[in-house]
Image (cartoon, rainbow, N blue to C red):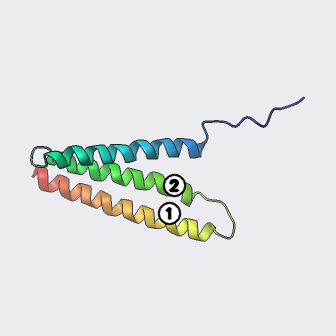
Amino acid sequence: MYVNRTKKNPYTKQTIFDILSVVSGLAVIGLGVFVFLNPEEYAQMFPVIFLLAAVFQILCAIPRLAGGYGKKSGKRKAVGICLCAAAGILLIFAVVSAICLWR
C-alpha cells in the first residue's frame, strides 16, 4: 500500500508553539502600547503584561529544552534554561507589581 509522505501535518508541536508564541507576543506588545497611552488609568494591567511576557518566554524555551541529541544540544538547552530564568524573573515582577497595586 502506498502512503503519501509528501504532505506534512500542519498541526505539529512546533507549529502550535509558534502560533502560541506569536499570539502571546502580540498580546504583550498590544497591552504595552495600550497601557503606555494612559499609565495612571491602566496601571492594574502591568501584572498581566508581566505574566504574558513570562508565558511568552516559557513558550520560547520549551522547544529548546526538548531538543534532541547532537553537537549543539547542550547550547540549545543552555539557551532554554536562560529563557526559563528570564520567565522566572518576569513572574516575580508580576507578583510584586500585583502586590504593590492591590495592597
Q: Residue at x 83, y 32 (%)?
A: 3
The location of residue 5, given as percent across then percent down, is 79, 37
Q: Residue at x 38, y 48 (%)?
A: 25
Q: Is residue 17 left or right of residue 57?
A: right
Q: Residue furthest right?
A: 1
Q: Secondary structure at mark 1?
A: helix
| Quadrant occupied by the N terminus | top right
- Circles 1, 2 touching at the beta carbon (< 8 Å): yes
Label 2 amino acid? Ile
The location of residue 66, given as percent across then percent down, is 58, 57
Q: In the rendered image, which quarter is residue 9 located in?
A: top right
Q: Secondary structure at mark 2?
A: helix
Front residue of 95 and 37: 37
Q: In the rendered image, which quarter is residue 74 located in?
A: bottom right
Disc 1/disc 2 C-alpha distance (Å): 7 Å
Q: Residue at x 28, y 60 (%)?
A: 92
Label 1 amino acid? Gly
| Residue underneath mark 1 | 80
The location of residue 87, given as percent across then percent down, is 37, 59
Q: Is residue 86 left or right of residue 45?
A: right
| Residue underneath mark 2 | 62
How many C-alpha atoms fall within 10 Å of the one at disc 1: few (<14), some, or many (≥20)?
many
